[in-house]
Image: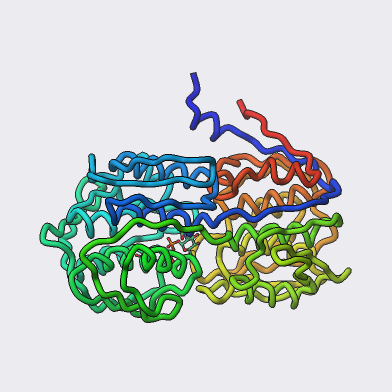
Amino acid sequence: MITQVEKMQKEVLVIEGKRKLQGILRVSGAKNSALPNMAATILTDKEVILENLPDLLDVKLMKQLLEDIGSHIDCIDNNVCSFRLSSPKSFVANYDIVSKMRASILVLGPMVARFGYAEVALPGGCSIGARPVDLHLKALEMMGAKIELQHGYIKAYAPKGLKGAHIFFEKITVTGTENIMMAAVLAEGQTIIENAALEPEVVDLAKMLKKMGADIQGEGTPRIVINGVKELNGTKHTIIPDRIEAGTFAVLSALSDGKIIIQNYPMEYLEYVNEVFKDIGIYILPVDKDKVIIKREERLKPVDIQTKEYPLFPTDLQAQFMTLLCFADGVSQITENIFENRFMHVSELNRMGADIKIVDRTAIIKGIKELTGADVKATDLRASAAMVIAGLVADGITKIHNIYHLDRGYEHIDTKLKNIGANLWREINE
Ligand code: UD1
């Protein structure tokens, strides 16, 4: 008997390329906003209602993690859930979940802040790099937590509560900033986070925490100041649209000749990306208050891209832009500055006829006329999105193995694509 997980891991997505794609693609709630906001529900014993939650694997894993800790979760439908953690039944985020979803580390800050104790499995490396959590731990130590690493677990103690501290992150870290912001809202005194991440998802988390009664200033700037409060209230909050899913859809739209309308495209979070699109010869045109269409010049121009922290070019769109630049007229370069091993999709794109070479942390992409369908591997979440786009515009049939990565971060992607005319299906690779 194979388990559900084993079945998922054997699933192959089969795509017939070059179909005319036409219709509306709706952008779902942001995964990277849903996960910290769900973790923040730990901070209160009152009810928190989250709307526009994306229905995807990582959100399901976070629900499971919260339920293991003792949260009561009631979902009205796939996208609206209420969370309430009256009293904890466990202080452990176990390896089984953490190994599937690194963002599980987000429960560490809120658990120590509210209960004075937490055990979270060490996430370890992943397919895109080592991804340590040392900065999260150092900051919690500065706030008075005692941290021990034992048997693959982080054990954090602060029996008398956390204390405000002046924290300077040596490196900008998104979940690090979120974790410490959540820890600081219930700490005694003032916490200052310097070199904080500016991502819209950090700002969205601060917005929800403020609605719960937290005292936070400066979110969206490199210096966040938090004055701890005794307790937080419940609230209702709507998750922001997923800028990465939106950018993924825009790339697909630019490469397919059909007419795709993207709904909920968050222009304000994609300003830099929209400029890069423009340099390539792709224009995002609003057609309605919440809809855009993508127009492109016949000849796509090559560009040089450097991935950087927000508001610059997101690493989470790097792979999708690699597929796009395969069709540019000339040689483009993409330098990956955030993760050291995030070029696993290069060899897969090359299997489909792309001409990409890697020199250190830079991929050199020579434009080609056409990609051809092939058997390829999805190597991580965003790489799998790049392969799906490639498969949809390639000549012939593409089979994407390890497609379960895609389901971690893209809500009902098969249905969304089928609704605009794609022909794709899943097979079990025995
Ligand atoms: C978040 C996003 C992920 C995105 C990434 C970069 C979520 C749930 N995930 O991941 O989709 O790709 O931001 O935009 O929001 N680092 C350390 N020590 C630490 C923490 C980070 O060295 O303690 C390094 C990382 O290895 C990486 C860099 O800092 O090289 C940035 O990582 P970070 O911003 O922390 O990424 P995540 O928050 O894990």
**Ligand 1: quadrant of the figure:** bottom left
State whether residue 22 appears in this view.
Answer: yes
Residue that lies at the very extreme toward the top in this rendered image: 1
Q: Position of residue 87 (x, y in %)?
A: 23, 44
Residue ranking furthest to the right:
298
In this picture, residue 426 sits left or right of residue 397:
left
Q: For this rendering, which residue is in front, 12 or 30?
A: 30
Q: Nearer the viewer, residue 78 or 260?
A: 78
Q: Is residue 384 left or right of residue 212?
A: right
Q: Position of residue 7 (x, y in %)?
A: 54, 29
The structure's colour scheme is rainbow
Q: Is residue 10 left or right of residue 294?
A: left
Identified at 32% across, 43% down, the residue is 71
Quadrant location, the C terminus: top right
Which quadrant would residue 320 be assigned to in this image?
bottom right
Label count reads 0
Please tell me which residue lies in front, 119 or 1.
119
> Viewed as shown, does residue 25 lie left or right of 55?
right
Residue 105 in view of the camera: no
Residue shown at the point (48%, 59%) measured from the top left: 33
Q: Position of residue 371 (x, y in %)?
A: 79, 53
Give above or below for 99 relative to 326.
above
Residue pictured at 74% horizontal, 47% vertical:
391
Residue 240 percent location from the top left of the image:
54, 61
